Amino acid sequence: MISMGFLMGSGFLVPAFFEQQKAIHDKFFRVVELGKQSFDEAMKEVQETIAQIPRPDMHWIVTHVEHAIRVGGENCVGFGSDFNGVESTPAEVDSCAAYPGIVDLLYDNGLNARQVEKVCWGNFKRVFSECVH
């Protein structure tokens, strides 16, 4: 099994960011449900408000990867992201162009070459191969 998803989403990486984001979303649902704002108006406000929350440091990605390895082992985490619909990413992570810097951080924080290879592509390759056969 691979743990994947919005590895780059600030709310998935940082508990405090998640709590702030959740409060904003809760307000969104209340105002739309009560008819105080249209969906589009409320969503615009959500996006503007979340953009005001300071973006976490990109080291949180490494913390997340290391946690997944501790919990499930190095064979269960795959490095990936879908930036479409993600409201916030860590500082300096605006696209996949940030990936080489994240790889450097993985090495800098003690992951070895085998682990980095698994996280970056090896685990996905293994799982995809198993699905095809």
Image (tube, helix red, strand yellow):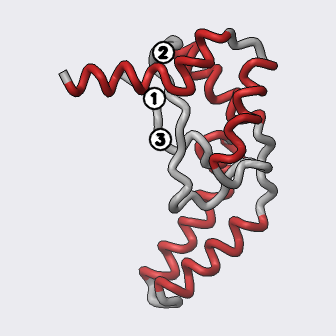
Of 114 and 14, the residue lying toward us: 114
> What's the residue at 69%, 47% (across, down)?
97
In this picture, residue 48 sits left or right of residue 1: right
Q: Which mark is residue 99?
A: none
> What's the residue at 76%, 12% (across, down)?
110
- Residue type at mark 2 is Gly
Give the spatial CA distance, label 2 vs label 1: 9 Å
Q: Position of residue 100 (x, y in %)?
A: 71, 35
The residue tagged 2 is 72
Of 129 and 76, the residue lying toward us: 129
The residue tagged 1 is 3
> What's the residue at 61%, 61% (across, down)?
87
Q: Which mark is in front, 2 or 3?
A: 3
Q: Are marks 2 and 3 in contact (CB under 8 Å)?
A: no
Q: Are marks 3 and 1 in contact (CB under 8 Å)?
A: yes
Q: Is residue 115 above or below residue 100?
A: above
Judged from the image, the secondary structure of the residue bearing numbered disc 2 is helix
